[in-house]
Image: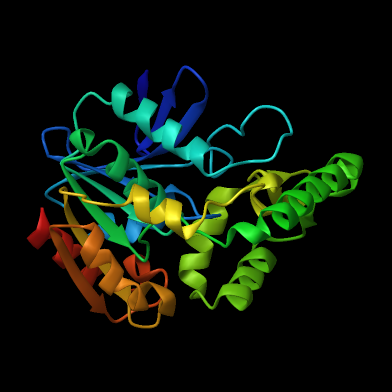
Amino acid sequence: MWQSFAPKNQIEFVLPHIKLSGRLWGPKDKPLLLALHGWLDNANSFEPLAAYLLEYQILAIDWPGHGFSAHRPGHYPLHWVDYLYDLDVLLTALPQKPIAIIGHSLGGIIASAYTATFPEKVNKLVLIEALSPLSEPAMQAKARLRKSFYQHEKYLTQQHLQVKRYDSIDIAIKARAHLTGLAEPWCRLLVERNMQSEVEGVSWRSDPRLRFDSPQRITFAQVDALMQDILVETLLVCGAQGFNQLQSAIPKARTWFKHLSEHIIEGDHHVHMGNAAGVARLIQEFV
């Protein structure tokens, strides 16, 4: 089910397993670009980019637990594979197939894994500061599982103590800017959608479980096997001041993606916000 809440371009999808919210920019007669945000961000992260991509519809969703989307039910640990299912069901619900999927950070990780698995369901792929699922050595599996379960057990026993409130949203904005180095205007754009007003100030709307360690991460051998022989045309955009490990992994990406266009442009990890004009230009040329 697809429902629009004009005039604030809010979108809601009531999927069989969860409710997803998002934002939609652009006229309905334009080609559709599906935008997937990063960890602890939300649909607002694509607002700067949408201002430059006026010849397209930009549909940016909030992943579960982010923005205005529902939290996953229960209190069990979260796993990245769940996002693949969200994306698959969402694509089935869309009234038209996107001409490209754009993924930033976590959104790019999910988009790349999905494209590798279901290439027939993706026309083109745009990865912004993202490449493939995260991996770690198999020897770390036990410690990761124990740590994840410990964090969630602690969360359940102290849940009533963990609602963090701020007198003003400005405090949370400055805290995120200090922690991440992201410019305050972009922090405000993201934080406003991830917080909610209360009688005494504001609190986080996002699911607290997002901050806990995942119980499992696959090995590089598994990632390498998954990402082989991707024929979907792919655009990779990295920020010059973004994550260094992404740029160092570009030679490996060339072996995975058979039709890869790669660009390193001025910007940090949120290059699609800080250098929206540059990213938009690359996307326009690509699609």
Q: Which residue is nearer to you in this view: 228 or 44?
A: 228
Relative vertical location of residue 64 with respect to residue 136 in this rendering, above or below: above
Q: Which residue is nearer to you in this view: 199 or 249?
A: 249
> Which residue is at a point 46% across and 59% down the rendered structure image?
220
Q: Estimate the x, y position of residue 14 in percent, counting from the top left.
A: 45, 21
Relative vertical location of residue 184 with respect to residue 283 in this rendering, above or below: below
Left/right placement of residue 274 relative to residue 66 reads left
> Which residue is at a point 15% across and 41% down the rendered structure image?
123
The answer to which image quadrant residue 149 occupies is top right
Relative vertical location of residue 165 with respect to residue 269 in this rendering, above or below: above
Q: Estimate the x, y position of residue 275 in percent, counting from the top left.
A: 30, 73
Left/right placement of residue 64 relative to residue 55 reads right
> Which residue is at a point 17% across and 38% down the rendered structure image?
27
| Residue 180 in view (yes/no) | yes
| Residue 53 in view (yes/no) | no
> Which residue is at a point 41% across and 54% down the rendered structure image?
223
What coloring was used for the rendering? rainbow
Q: Estimate the x, y position of residue 174 in percent, counting from the top left.
A: 63, 72
Q: Estimate the x, y position of residue 170 in percent, counting from the top left.
A: 64, 66
Q: Which residue is nearer to you in this view: 197 or 131?
A: 131
Left/right placement of residue 268 relative to residue 40 reads left
Q: Quadrant of the N terminus?
A: top left
Query: How many numbered discs?
Result: 0
Q: Which residue is nearer to you in this view: 132 or 76?
A: 132
The answer to which image quadrant residue 236 occupies is bottom left
Left/right placement of residue 67 relative to residue 56 reads right
